[in-house]
Image (cartoon, rainbow, N blue to C red):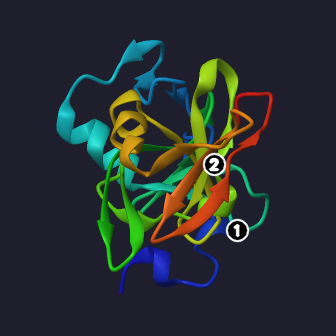
Amino acid sequence: MRPADHPEFFRFPAPEGRSRESSIVLDAEGRFQHDGALVDHPGMAQAFASWIDLHPDDGRFILNNGYDWTYFSVSDVPFFVLGLHERAGELVLALSDGSQSPLDPGSLTLGAQGALYTTVKNGRFRARFSQAAQIALGPWLREAENGAVFLEIAGTRHALENSGGGS
């Protein structure tokens, strides 16, 4: 049994002399930093990405490895779409934590500088498309007569909403 399996796991105090607050930041480019320095070890950065969660009581971002957890800061979004592929008439997104998530076309929004955002992981989180993933979406993008851009998947059109902001 892992500590995270205990029903009070998120309510246990931090280990003695420690805090649940951290100086870990996920920046707007999807890079982790700790105490202002880039986390450049690929295994550690990937581990952090795979530990992203929300605290069940206060909804703040946490890193949770099942044995311990800490709060961290997110500059834009907690996940990034790195690629995509079509499967059985739907688009499947490859995410920065190594997982896959089906695209919810209704959640696509255009943010600042034309960046695409969507919800992932059953709508729990927001994700921003990397430039490569946004380019890979090209075969499904169409332009309407009025100049509006929409997504067409398996013959169904999906409007792209303009959020006017970042996330």
Spot occupied by residue 69 in the image (x, y as percentages of width and height): 51, 55
Q: Earlier in the sequence, mark 1 or mark 2?
A: 1
Q: Quadrant of residue 46?
A: top left
Q: Left or right: 55 with respect to 88?
A: right
Query: Which numbered marker is on residue 61?
Result: 2
Q: Residue furthest front?
A: 145
Closest to the observer: 117 or 53?
Answer: 117
Badge number at residue 151: none
Residue 79, given in percent of the width and then of the height, sits at: 49, 45
Image x and y of residue 32, in percent:
41, 28
Label 2 is placed on what type of residue? Phe
Q: Quadrant of the N terminus?
A: bottom left
| Vertical relation: 51 (above or below) 8 | above
3 or 26, which lies in front?
A: 26
Q: In the image, what residue occupies the spot 56% across and 34% down?
A: 22
* Image: 91 above or below 112: below
Is 6 situated above or below 159? Answer: below
Binning the other alpha carbons within 10 Å of mark 1 as few (below 14), some (14 to 19) or many (20 upward) gives few
Disc 1 element: loop
Any part of residue 150 in sight: yes
Which residue corresponds to the image point at 38% horizontal and 46% vertical from the top-left?
49
Residue shown at 63%/38% (left/top)? 21
Report whether residue 96 is seen: no
Residue on which disc 1 sits:
56
Spatial separation of the CA atoms under disc 1 and disc 2: 10 Å
Q: Position of residue 107 (x, y in %)?
A: 67, 57
